[in-house]
């Protein structure tokens, strides 16, 4: 009997399974976030899910910005972005670091998007990543994508986008085969001293699920033109607590910054 | 004879309603099936099919064998037929209808059409009934009797038609045959000894056909853009797989993959006897140097097969790229253009310079004050500073903008409250307005939703940031309307 050898082999397998970052990781460059992720960053060559919150679960705007920031830092190659409705705006993506010229948009019916994603995850195509805006994600389909991504080393980002609140409620908490699940929601912008109007826009980035990691939440400033998010200045040193809205002074209407 | 009379004469008479449209459709289908003999086939009138077999007969071992094969297959489909082969369409028409019989095709030797036509009735010349009756009245019953007649006398009495038809029948006047549908550039055919219905066999067949075609394209330095794979079924129907490629290609594995990917759309019925691969559009594709280095072009060739696979299933117009345009109208600042368009881009070449959105009006198109915040020549890293000075643009842009119900206080204020998709939003902060007017120099400027828009960036109480605009002037008539045009990340 070679019990010891068997156990050693099993241990090796477990190590393999627990080390999902076979294709390297993409650090966020923020210690707090990278520490929560196994391997110190977003594992490449796997499947990640990104959702919005509230009404943005349908529009997927904050999630798209977050995804654009990640894509900007993964590489410079082409990106396959599969979506049901072509409402991406190039200049907006550029502001979060993603050069829209890298995108190949695939407009497909809902049930064809998974197929298109799997095609994009085949090895040897030279894609940097694939993005899919999908609503329903059956477990089996998710596992297939995960396997395809592992084989080719191409990162798949699933932007979960639901048609309406009812669908979102039904699908939101379903388990999936993705390695991580993120929720990105817009936060009221940070005040800029002596400036009325919208300040520095911020997100609450929540890591809801992470294999081998710890769920956590951070308030960050949105991805800039290099694709990096940064911790909000006033929150960088202390735990995130609900900040009180500052009284708007005598002005009862919205705070407005005039153009010009 | 009216139907009622006929019924009274023969009580057990079987009748069926005439369906000319269905008959014509069936004839067209049969003509298409005859494509196994030649790419040039067409239905002829309501009861015939013309097949141009010039240069095709030897593939079947001669005209007689071709006719025999055709007869055998038609018999099996239980189609009564009469077949004739002649040097001119007119002669073949006459022989098929007046000389041939079921199982006895009329095949005059080359040059012997004149003698073969001579004993036939004058009606065989495709003449109008009254002209044929006129000929009979003066005792001209056979085509051969027309041969010695002086032409001018015939023309004077019966018009040009008789001489014209006679010349056509004898091949003295050309009569072109226009094929059913588009004539292919190249064609490869594969016939099976027995009808097959197994998709795996189809896949093997497609691979063989594509390999044949690819070898020929390689010799000619061409690449395929549009292909049609036809499956000729035993029952005379034809099934098609049509594919297009984003770039000219002659890679057999790639093309076969595209065709095989659509095999599930083919209904083989009782079996398929022939597969015909037709090339309808080809473009120059110079001989390739297999890369020694890891050059950027290699990436381009890597993604093209993917685009073709996606395009074959979803349609090539489902694929697009985002192309920056120098326009301050938000809808036009970023265009989605089809991937198949011949245009250099990042996908083609990573090191090459990006084309400027050049146009005769380029001096108008990029004044400083109307910059779209999306510099076509800019790289993200280097434009960070520039971006900071420009008004932000949303990540999602709705086309068309979605109307909202808004409430506002002062004429120039953004709404403090609005309802969009039946959800209420309370505005906490806002930036603006940013006025965007139509492009007066563009021809279709009136096509924009509204000529004058004041854009506001607003943030609701939860922190979501929207891009709203007011169409029309505040206090104007009609009252201004509000739209949400996009959502910021």
Image (spheres, coloured by chain):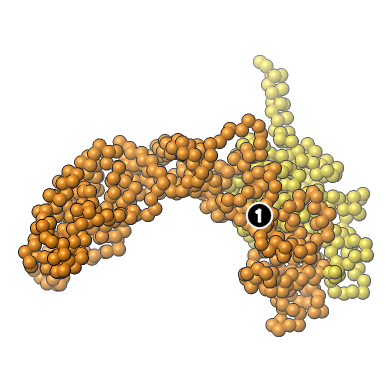
Q: Tell me the residue at 54%/46% (across/down).
A: B247
At mark 1, the secondary structure is: strand
Identify the residue at the far top of this view.
Answer: A1
The tally of labels here is 1
Q: Horizontal and vertical percent for residue B314? A: 53, 51
Q: Horizontal and vertical percent for residue B1? A: 13, 71
Q: Tell me the residue at 16%/64% (across/down).
A: B152
Output the chain of dot 1: B
**Colour of chain A as rendered:** yellow
Q: Tell me the residue at 17%/43% (across/down).
A: B109
Q: Is residue B141 left or right of residue A128?
A: left
State whether residue B319 appears in this view. Answer: no
Q: Tell me the residue at 78%/61% (across/down).
A: B392
Q: Can you say which quadrant of the picture contains the N terminus of chain A?
A: top right
Residue holding disc 1: B322
Which chain wears orange?
Answer: B
Query: A5 and A77: which one is in front?
Result: A77
């Amino acid at each position: 009997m070679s019990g010891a050898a068997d156990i050693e082999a099993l241990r090796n397998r477990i190590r393999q399974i627990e080390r999902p970052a076979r294709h390297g990781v993409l650090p966020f460059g923020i210690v707090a976030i990278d520490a929560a992720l196994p391997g110190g960053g977003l594992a490449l060559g796997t499947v990640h899910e990104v959702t919005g919150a509230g009404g943005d679960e349908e529009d997927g705007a904050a999630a798209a910005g977050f995804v654009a920031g990640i894509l900007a830092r993964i590489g410079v190659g082409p990106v396959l972005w599969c979506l049901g409705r072509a409402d991406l705006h190039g200049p907006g993506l550029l502001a979060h670091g993603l050069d829209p010229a890298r995108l190949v948009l695939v407009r497909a019916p809902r049930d064809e998007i998974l197929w298109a994603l799997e095609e994009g995850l085949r090895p040897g195509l030279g894609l940097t990543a694939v993005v899919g805006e999908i609503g329903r994600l059956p477990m089996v389909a998710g596992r297939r994508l995960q396997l395809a991504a592992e084989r080719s080393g191409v990162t798949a980002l699933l932007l979960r986008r639901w048609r309406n609140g009812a669908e979102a409620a039904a699908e939101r908490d379903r388990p999936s085969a993705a390695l991580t699940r993120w929720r990105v929601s817009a936060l009221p912008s940070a005040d800029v001293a002596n400036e009325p109007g919208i300040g520095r826009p911020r997100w609450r980035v929540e890591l809801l699920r992470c294999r081998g990691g710890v769920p956590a939440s951070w308030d960050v400033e949105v991805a800039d033109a290099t694709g990096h998010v940064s911790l909000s200045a006033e929150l960088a040193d202390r735990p995130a607590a609900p900040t009180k809205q500052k009284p708007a002074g005598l002005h009862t209407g919205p705070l407005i910054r005039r153009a010009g | 004879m009216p139907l009622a009379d006929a019924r009274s004469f023969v009580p057990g008479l079987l009748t069926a309603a005439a369906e000319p449209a269905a008959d014509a459709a069936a004839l067209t289908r049969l003509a298409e099936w005859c494509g196994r003999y030649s790419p040039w086939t067409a239905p002829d009138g309501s009861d015939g099919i013309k097949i141009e077999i010039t240069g095709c007969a030897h593939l079947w071992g001669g005209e007689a064998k071709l006719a025999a094969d055709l007869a055998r297959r038609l018999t099996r489909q239980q189609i009564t037929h009469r077949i004739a082969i002649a040097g001119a369409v007119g002669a073949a028409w006459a022989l098929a209808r007046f000389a041939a019989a079921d199982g006895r095709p009329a095949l005059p030797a080359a040059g012997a059409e004149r003698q073969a036509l001579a004993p036939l009735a004058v009606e065989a010349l495709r003449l109008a009934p009254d002209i044929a009756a006129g000929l009979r009245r003066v005792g001209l019953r056979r085509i051969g009797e027309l041969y010695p007649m002086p032409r001018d006398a015939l023309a004077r009495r019966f018009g040009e038609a008789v001489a014209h038809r006679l010349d056509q029948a004898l091949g003295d006047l050309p009569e072109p045959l226009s094929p059913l549908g588009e004539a292919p550039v190249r064609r490869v055919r594969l016939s099976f000894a027995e009808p097959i219905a197994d998709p795996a066999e189809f896949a093997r067949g497609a691979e063989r056909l594509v390999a044949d075609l690819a070898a020929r394209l390689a010799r000619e330095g061409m690449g395929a853009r549009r292909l049609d794979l036809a499956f000729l079924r035993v029952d005379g129907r034809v099934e098609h797989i049509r594919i297009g490629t984003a770039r000219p290609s002659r890679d057999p594995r790639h093309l076969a993959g595209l065709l095989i990917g659509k095999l599930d759309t083919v209904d083989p019925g009782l079996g398929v006897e022939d597969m015909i691969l037709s090339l309808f559009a080809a473009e120059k594709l110079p001989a390739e140097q297999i890369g020694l280095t890891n050059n950027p072009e290699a990436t381009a060739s890597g993604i093209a097969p993917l685009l073709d696979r996606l395009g074959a299933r979803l349609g090539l117009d489902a694929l697009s790229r985002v192309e920056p345009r120098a326009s301050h109208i938000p809808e036009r600042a970023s265009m989605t253009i089809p991937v198949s368009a011949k245009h250099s881009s990042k996908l083609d070449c990573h090191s090459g310079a990006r084309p400027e959105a050049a146009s005769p009006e380029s001096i108008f198109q990029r004044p400083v004050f109307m910059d779209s915040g999306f510099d076509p020549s800019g790289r993200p890293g280097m434009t960070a500073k520039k971006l900071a000075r420009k008004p932000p643009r949303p990540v999602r842009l709705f086309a068309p903008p979605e109307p909202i119900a808004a409430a506002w206080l002062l004429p120039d204020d953004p709404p403090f409250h609005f309802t969009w998709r039946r959800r209420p939003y309370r505005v906490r902060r806002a930036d603006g307005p940013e006025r965007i007017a139509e492009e007066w120099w563009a021809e279709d400027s009136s096509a924009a939703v509204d000529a004058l828009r004041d854009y506001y960036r607003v943030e609701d109480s939860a922190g979501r940031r929207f891009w709203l605009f007011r169409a029309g002037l505040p206090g104007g008539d009609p009252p201004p309307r509000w739209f949400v045009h996009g959502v910021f990340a």
